[in-house]
Amino acid sequence: FRAEGRGGSPLLRRMLRALVAVSLWLRVSPRAQGAPCEAVRIPMCRPMPWNITRMPNHLHHSTQENAVLAIEQYEELVGTGCSPVLPFFLCAMYAPICTLEFLYDPIKPCRSVCQRARDGCEPIMRRYNHSWPESLACHRHRPARG
C-alpha cells in the first residue's frame, strides 16, 4: 500500500477522517462514557474475586481515586471483623464488577449481603455514635433471586 503524493490517496484520507470521527464519538457518547472496564486499584478490593471494575460506581464516584478516599473510612471497621461480608459488600459498591452483560448498569450486592454487613457492624458503629450510612441503606438493594 502506497500513499499518492503528500496528502495520500483520497480513500486513505476519508478512512482516516472516519476513524477520527468514530474515536471522537466514542469519547463523548453518553452511552460510551464510563463504559470501559478498568483494573481494580482500590487496595481493600484487590483480594476480591473480580479484578476489573467500571466508574462511575453505585455511589457516583467518577474515579477510583475518589472511591478509595471514601472507602478508606471503613478500614478500621473492616479490621474489627464485625462482619465477614463487609469487605465484599463495600467493594461491590465502591468497585463494582465489570462484565459485558452489565457494562452500563453494574451489579449491586443483594439486600441480604447488605443486611449481614449492617447487622454485624452497626452495633460497633453505634458505640461510637455512628449509624449505618444512608448511602449504603439496605432497602435500596434487591432481594436475592432464589
Image: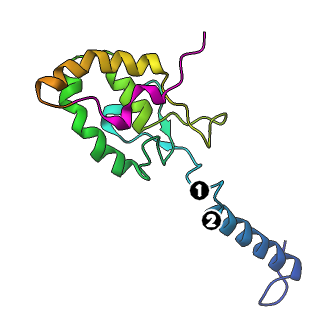
Give the numbered dot on residue 133: none
Which percent across, then down, holds residue 88?
39, 24
Residue with the most extreme bottom position: 6
Report which residue position mark 2 lands on: 28
Q: Secondary structure at mark 2?
A: helix
Residue extent of the magenta highlight: 131-146
Q: Residues within 10 Å of mark 2 (few under 14, many from 20)?
A: few
| Position of residue 81 in the picture relative to residue 7 (left or right) | left
Q: Quadrant of residue 98?
A: top right
The residue located at (41%, 49%) in the rendering is 61
Can residue 46 be seen here? The reply is no
Q: Amino acid at mark 2?
A: Val
Q: Residue at x 31, y 37 (%)?
A: 43
Q: Residues within 10 Å of mark 1 (few under 14, many from 20)?
A: few
Quick check: marks 1 and 2 in contact, CB under 8 Å? Answer: yes
Q: Earlier in the sequence, mark 1 or mark 2?
A: 2
User: Which residue is at the front of the view, 105 or 135?
Assistant: 135
Secondary structure, mark 1, is loop
Q: Position of residue 84 (x, y in %)?
A: 31, 15
Residue 67: x and y, percent? 35, 45
Which residue is situated farthest in the left direction here?
A: 128
Instruction: From the image, tell me which residue sits under label 1.
Output: 33
* Magenta stretch: includes residue 144: yes
The answer to whether 128 is drawn above or below residue 2 in the figure is above
Q: Indicate whether 62 appears above or below 123.
A: below
- The answer to if 25 sits in the magenta stretch is no
Q: Which kind of residue does numbered mark 1 sit on? A: Gln
**Residue beneath the point at 23% across and 16% down:** 82
Q: CA distance from mark 1 to mark 2?
A: 7 Å
